[in-house]
Image (tube, rainbow, N blue to C red):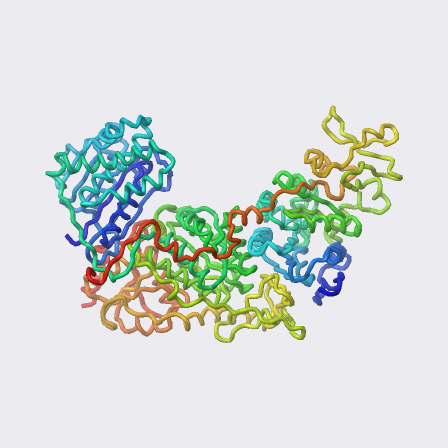
Amino acid sequence: MDSIAVRIAGDSGDGIQLMGTRFAVSTALTGADFATFPDYPAEIRAPAGSLFGVSAYQINLGSGTITTAGDSPDVLVAFNPAALKVSLPLLERGALIIINNDSFTARNLARAGYKQDPREDGTLEDFQCVTADISRLNLESIKVFGLSKSDGDRCKNFWALGVLLWMFERDLASVEDWIRRRLDNQTKIRNANIAALHAGHAYGENTELSASVPRYDIRKSEMPPGEYRSVTGAEALALGIAAAGELADRPVMFCSYPITPSSPLLHRLALLGETGVGTFQAEDEIAAVCAAIGASYGGMIGVTSSSGPGIALKAEAIGLAVSAELPLVIVNWQRGGPSTGLPTKTEQSDLFQAVYGRNGDTPLPVLAAASSEDCFNIAVESVRIALRHMTPVILLVDGYLSNASEPWKIPDISALEPIEHHPAPAPCKDQDAQRQAFRRDENSFGRPWIVPGMEGLMHRIGGLEKDIETGHISYDPANHQQMTDLRQAKVDCVANYIPAQSLECGADHGDLVVVGWGSTYGPIYQATIETGVSFVHLRNINPLPVNLGELLGRFDTVLVPEMNNGQLAALLREKLCLQTVSFPKVSGQPFRISELVDRIESLKKEGK
Amino acid sequence: MSTELTAKDFTTTQEVRWCPGCGDYAILKSVTRALADAGASPESTAFISGIGCAARFPYYVESYGFHTIHGRAPAIATGLKLANPELDVWVVSGDGDALSIGGNHLMHALRRNVGLKILLFNNEIYGLTKGQYSPTSRVGTVSPSSPAGSVDMPVSPGQFALGSGARFFARAVDADKEGLSEVLQGAHAFAGASLTEIFQNCIVYNKDVFASFTDRKDASKMQLRLKHGEPMLFGDNAKKGIRFNKDTFALEVIEVKSSPEDVLVHDETNEVVARLLIDLQEPVALGILFRKPAQSFECAFYGLHPSEMKRSRSVAEFLRGASSWTVSPENS
């Protein structure tokens, strides 16, 4: 078997995300390739048994190249009727469903909107169904520890994980180690979870399950040699930011306000203090970006992070950083909008906000991460651009990548180029420090990074328009035009420093090219391989690579699938004067490979 | 520095653009003099401001300066102070900037006790936008946006500060060189967040709004100038004093000679009395009303970052995470 997709679904209080994450890490250790999709509700503990409270974790693992969490799960673990109801439409006939019998009570069935028990009315006829009294068996297995019923019930995710690990012929040791470390000081709960894990595994081995359930042996994927780990987008981005600080030989100050799904980055960076990273939890989104600007003004690499609603609040301050020509990195973990929208669901609908969303003509560079592991490299690149050009940079990441994990070849930081900035000049009595502060590099238009504390270079900056040479306040009409042109030229010239756009796959000319950005890399890659068309993936959104127009011009049709209402398609039309075919999807769910294949095939037919 | 600096060394060549007669001129003079007197070094001093008339201040001080956006100066200054705790960071703000649009940031800078010297130029009006009533305007203030008189209750900067957990609150009058100089010195020396309210006379939009206690002829009987450890006396020949009335839980004015032993001695660390002093109307309490040092935010922050943001471990040590595996050339 080349690949298999597993979906675990239950109540938001069932520990689904934890169970999925441990399964992913266990998968990683076997050397298989994998991709995950955490799909959870906005409510921390939604009413038990409700449809909207279903939390799910999907993982696709295989010996080939895996780039998506899988269109259709081959195995579903359903902890309750609501989880079954929500997940069933995703399954193909013949999929294996493991059901927790104990939760199929009359009340839970009603909550899920089932008039009849789906286990008995033929609903599951086309599937291979295994029902087990998971709740009861779990509680029995940990009876000796004397936990309360509610504490005991919380172990059932590990009981079910034990069954899964048995199905995939996995070793329990790594999960057990993790439980030991995680629950180090809670002996009873720790031992109960370990016992549940073993009991689930033994259940698979010893009971009738052995006869009815296939066992999956996924072999190692053919990955390039090297040392690997499993990494989420938040982990990779945190390490990338820390690495950028090291490469620039500057401390990093990360200032943020908690918001879903951005907070995991704050949590990760808070653990990296020893690498020269400070974390400051500000009182609000505006204070977060402002404190980051203050830190940059003081000579640290200021970084802030949020998702759409928070980025909206930061807009005025981002404009200040553009005006004052200070470095800053703003990470946007894009979630469903508008307004509060779908906090835990993924989207790509903040592209316009990033490129255009400020008052005045206020351009800035925009980058987008292609995958969880790409978050590392793109964080380094973002800081590099911010320091070289003395500008804020927006880094767009599709929200679900925050918690989605995949294998990552551990990089060699010492092999990366150091990050440079324009150093402060020597103080000079004959020179006006005000002019020295705004003597910009003629190629990058970056100005020297002069910070308070430096002797003899005192100067004043601000958000009022300033004279292009002296930096003093200026209301001169010609000067404002010059400054506006300068700000645009600075962002445009970033294109001279980024790699030329290349193709991910397919011929370099032809009928059809698919253009993607962000996390759609995975499904588009698979779909274009399957259909034999060409694929261009953008990591630089603003400015676009200089050769992009010429490259895309070699194709008759440019198809742009994206998880918004056609924003990149519009941007390409505007910037490249190019006709595009938009393929928008705004459901809070990633593209499936099959829907992309269908769209490509129908376009091919239309073209003929 | 081989020679001692004077107020002039802290003055830029920029033309000052406040209205003729504006109270800000006097404040600027007192601040530059206070910096010189305190032996501050221009390169280690930064003035951060938001938006408003007061916010032009950094352009006129020969130090580092950042004129930022409306209300956010305390947040930007917090980032700067974290980046370099050695700096003397001043925040210059007005009543609209600090207490309306920026109220949230002021509250958090004060409760965190970030080492910022915050100057609040209170003129009870919006000057730069041409005279609308402000969050400190008294009820009934007639302005372009309140032609029938404002109806909202004003905020008390002092009560706001203490309610937020501020450890330093002082007051002075713009033109009062001696009194202003004294509180500026106190603010400069204070290690945590200090809020200094300066009664500033906006001669265009709210002229003489503080005249009842700033007019020279009435100053002695309308001003209570506080000094730590000294009795609270005021009026001609210091004939009047302040007493705590145990029945009403309030401060009251007494004739000193009738019961001198009742006159309160100013204890600047007493927060309860400070709150009563803030609300005193006749006389108005000036000077350092409350000063009670505590660990500053930046000290606590760097206590948690013992490496002082210096890299003590390389990022490479963290790349592996909890577990990793190796793909060797033969099995790939």
Q: Is residue A415 left or right of residue B298?
A: left
Q: Quadrant of residue B204?
A: bottom right
**Residue B243 seen by the camera:** yes
Q: x, y (%) of residue A144? A: 27, 26
Q: Quadrant of the C terminus of chain A?
A: bottom left
Q: x, y (%) of residue B145? A: 65, 48
Q: Is residue A100 left or right of residue A385?
A: left
**Residue B128 seen by the camera:** no
Kindly identify the residue that appears in the image at 83 percent across and 29 percent down.
B261
Q: x, y (%) of residue B31? A: 73, 55
The residue closer to the viewer here, B42 or A570, is B42
The residue closer to the viewer here, A425 or A459, is A425
- In this view, the residue farthest toward the front is B312
Q: Quadrant of residue B149?
A: top right
Kindly identify the residue that appears in the image at 38 percent across and 38 percent down.
A44
Q: Quadrant of residue A507?
A: bottom left
The residue closer to the viewer here, A148 or B240, is A148
Q: Is residue A122 left or right of residue A478?
A: left
Q: x, y (%) of residue A287? A: 53, 50
Q: How many badges with numbers are in the image? A: 0
- In this view, the residue farthest toward the top is B247
